[in-house]
Amino acid sequence: MQNIPNPRKKYIQYIYLIEGVSLPTTTAKYWDQIKSFQARPDDLLICSYPKAGSTWLQETVDMIQNADNLQKRAQNLCQNLPECFVPIISDLDNAKARPSPRSLKSHLPVHLLAPSFWEQKCKVIYIARNAKDTVVSYFHFHHMNKTLPYPGNWEEFLDKFLAGKVICGSWFDHVCGWWEAKKRHPILYLFYEDMKEDPIREMRKIAQFLGLEVQEPVLNQILEHTQFETMKGNKMANYGNVSPCLMDHTVSPFLRKGIVGDWKEHFTVSQSEHLDGICSQLLEGSGLTFRTEL
C-alpha cells in the first residue's frame, strides 16, 4: 500500500488511556461530561467501532424514523444525529439540548458508555464490520482526517490495530463487548456485510426493532437514497462540506469504496493469515462470525 507523507504528530502524542482504551486527548478533557451524560428512556443510540458503516446506518435509521418526509431528511447527518462521545463539545451540548425522542451515536466500547443509557433501558442499534475491511478503511480515514494522529505506514497501522492501540481500542473487545451486552439490553446487532447483501431485509429488522411499520415502496425509496454512490455524491452525507483543513478529500474521500472485500487490495497473504488466526483465537466461543467476502 502507498505510504502517504504526513507532517502530523505521531500516534502516541494524540491518545489518552481511559480504562485501558485509547481515546483522543481532547475526549479526556470532557470525559466527566461524557460519562455523566443523562440519557432519556426514549433515546435511540447508534453504535459501532469506527469505519464499520455507522454513517450508512445513521442515514438508513433516520429515513426509517421519518418515512413520511424523506426529502426533509436530506440534511447534514451531524444535525440529524449528534455524536456526544467525540471531542466536539458543541455536539455534546447539541445532544443535551435536543427534544425527545433523540437519536444519538457513539463509537465507545460498551464498558465506557454512560451508565444512564443502561439505567433508562435505551434501545441501541450496533453495526459490526469484518476486521480486515475495517482496518483498511480506518487507515485511509486517518490519512484524510487531519484531526487524527498520523497513522504511519500500512504495516505500522495494522500492527497498532491488532494490538488495540488505536483510537477506540481493540476491535475484538469492541465487537465482542457489544455482542455480549445484547443478552442483557435491548440491542439490535447488525452486520455490515448483511446490509450490503440484502439492505431491504436489514431495514425490516430495524423497523421492527423500533416498532415501526414501513411499506415496501418506502423501503425502496430509502434504499435508493442510501445507496453508496448516492451518499458519496451528497455533501451532507460524505462530509464534503467540512473544511479541507479538517478533512482532506483529495487524500481519500470520507466515503471511499463501501464494499466487502477491499482488504484484498491491501493485505499480503501473510498478513491475512495472521489476522485470520487472531480472529479464530479471540472470537472463539463468542458465537460471532464475520464474512470477509460476499
Image (spheres, grey):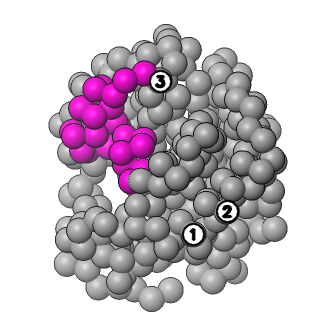
Report if residue 38 lies within the magenta region. Answer: no
Q: Residue at x 36, y 45 (%)?
A: 79
Q: Nearer the viewer, residue 292 or 19?
A: 292
Q: Secondary structure at mark 1?
A: helix
Residue 158 at x, y percent in the picture: 50, 68
Residue 75 left/right relative to 110:
left
Q: Which residues are magenta?
A: 76-100
Q: Nearer the viewer, residue 43 or 109?
A: 43
Cβ atoms at labels 3 and 1 below 8 Å apart: no
Looking at the image, residue 270 lies above or below residue 44: below
Between discs 2 and 1, the one toward the N terminus: 2
Which quadrant of the rendered structure holds the C terminus?
A: bottom right
Between discs 3 and 1, the one toward the N terminus: 3
Residue 17 left/right relative to 133:
left
Residue receiving disc 1:
230
Between discs 3 and 2, the one toward the N terminus: 3
Amino acid beneath label 2: Glu
Question: Quadrant of the rendered structure where residue 98 is?
Answer: top left
Other-residue count near label 2 (Cα within 10 Å), few / some / many at <14 / 14–19 / ≥20: few
Residue 266 at x, y percent in the picture: 59, 81
Is residue 194 in view from this perspective? no
Picture disc at residue 224:
2
Residue receiving disc 3:
101
Looking at the image, residue 144 lies above or below residue 120: below
Cβ atoms at labels 2 and 1 below 8 Å apart: yes
Looking at the image, residue 26 lies above or below residue 138: above
Residue 211 left/right relative to 258:
right
